[in-house]
Image (spheres, helix red, strand yellow):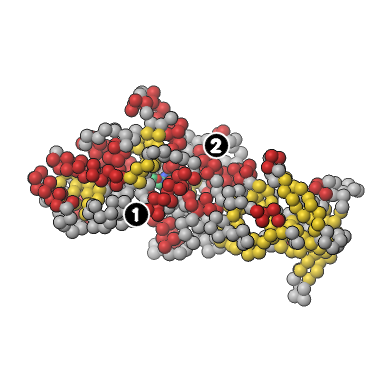
Amino acid sequence: MNQVKSPAKSDSKASLEAHNFLKLIIEKDIEAQKNKGQVVTRFPPEPNGYLHLGHAKSICLNFGLARDFSGRCHLRFDDTNPETEDIEYVESIKADVKWLGFDWHEHLYFASDYFQQLYDWAELLIQKNKAYVCSLNEEELRRYRGDFTTPGQDSPYRSRSVEENLDLFRRMKAGEFNEGDHVLRAKIDMKSPNMNMRDPLLYRIRKVPHHRTGNKWCLYPMYDYAHPLSDAIEQVTHSICTLEFQDHRPFYDWCIENLPTQGQPKQYEFARMNMTYLVMSKRKLLQLVKEKLVIGWDDPRMPTISGIRRRGYTPEAIHSFTKRIGVSKAESVIDFEILESCVRDDLDSVAHRAMAVLKPIKVVIENLPHGHEEEIQAAVHPKKPELGKRTLYFTKEVYIDAADFMENPDSDFFRLSPGQEVRLRNAYVIKCKEVIKDSTGQIIELRCEYDHVTLGGKPTADGRKIKGVIHWVSATKCVEAEIRLYGRLFKVAEPEKVEEGQDFKSNLNPSSLRVVKKAKLEISLKSAQLDLRYQFERVGYFCLDSKDSKSEALVFNMTVDLQSGY
Ligand code: ATP
Ligand code: MG
């Protein structure tokens, strides 16, 4: 589990497409004409939270295999736990799958649609003497079950007659008993070395309304019973899940073997995806939301699909990421930087270029007349002339970033400093003549002169070399915006590794959000669009915040910084 997969910088793109062992299994099945050569997969979330990057991997895998083998993939909600489930989650999950570019067409299903069938099959198991009503309480159930080293013991209720079982089970359904009075169990083998085969629970009484079936049922099937049978009802061929279900597979097969299902699905397991600096569990993410440690499920720092979407990640980046990490049975932790590098690769090709100054210092260009306003055309994308040009305004007052000026520069500093020259990107070379400070010694403005022959990258007349290029924004023709800069949500690579008595929340990074209130942006960004991505040159990739940005008060999120060392 501690193997960390890091970005392989020198690898070519093709060799980065990693191995997917499930593809090989399916290819063989098709060759052998298993399931008449058909491939049906499903993505089966429980609607008890928002989806995260681990689910994105599972979605790309299941829908991707169906697409690659001309099959189909169902979206099925495994909604067997009415206490924790909600319609809000159902809707968010649908939106997330769509955003990733997949379509379930007419194959949207809910395990709750099968409650009647599942119930009828439970009666059938009773009739076949393969299930019984057990009246042990929770504590006794646990004790009778034994553990890894101790075999289980038969429940004293195991020998109830078929008639008594049927009668009790029907009365459980009719609501005659309280929660915990009875459960229905499969009759398999209390001595099995596999705990999951020690007469697992099939049904329990829960007197809570369900988000879809309301008060119709007070008896709900267990996930391990509902899941294989739902797969079988839908005639799923390859039921792909994560490794923790490996030991559940014998019971999965038991359900299919003992009931007259149409389909004969087979379960295959792959390793869950874990990533450095993140937690990947709905339950833990829910804690962050409930305890208001983040602003919501779609907080741009969250590893939820709605969070990364708001942050500006693209579906294309997620696809190339899942391809790159592959599918295997070996547990590993993926370096978060692999994902970031996929995001950068994609954004580099689509993001519109613009300039923004996050920490402005004013520069007054002394050899320009008052009110000077020169229009300069700059490419929207350096490699995509079809995206056209944007207009910059070169004016007497401009802003540059405080980090691009040093009063007493080091020898390797090639940006602006007193007496030195630098090129303003897309515009002219300027030279710093004077530094103006207030009474406290704070720099308030720089007095500069520009060299009029150097527009748009042209050389100086006397062949002087200008090493540095910095970004800038007109001070009189610009737009202000709030910029939200994000760091890692957790300050350590493995946030779930904690000392006794601590929990993962103690590893939250207190400076994961930094807000710049009045950044200065080039005027073209006044009409920035929600569905576009922007590269603020020399800073990073940004997008409008889908919730908080207004046309009169723009808010941008930083999606990812540029590769360090521009
Ligand atoms: P969580 O532990 O976050 O609640 P889960 O597995 O309980 O996740 P489900 O809604 O049951 O969530 O999962 C739907 C599908 O997504 C399952 O097939 C599950 O195996 C898969 N999945 C969940 N987490 C990951 C992950 N980290 N990597 C790969 N697949 C995952
Ligand atoms: Mg779950």
Which residue in the protein does label 1 denote?
Answer: 85
The residue that appears at 83% across and 59% down in the rendered structure is 372
Q: Amino acid at mark 2?
A: Leu
Callout 2: SS: helix
Is disc 2's CB within 8 Å of ligand 1? no
The residue that appears at 26% across and 48% down in the rendered structure is 222
Side of 532 where 492 appears, left or right: left
Q: Report if residue 6 is visible in the image.
A: no
Side of 500 where 443 appears, left or right: right
Q: Report if residue 164 is visible in the image.
A: yes
In the image, which disc is placed on residue 208?
none
Q: Nearer the viewer, mark 1 or mark 2?
A: 1
Q: Quadrant of residue 28?
A: top left
Side of 472 where 186 appears, left or right: left
Q: Residue 346's spot in the image, x, y percent?
A: 59, 43
The residue that appears at 18% across and 59% down in the rendered structure is 178
Which residue in the protein does label 2 denote?
Answer: 16
Q: Residue 189's spot in the image, x, y percent?
A: 18, 42
How many residues crowd mark 2 within 10 Å: few (<14), some (14–19), many (20+)? some
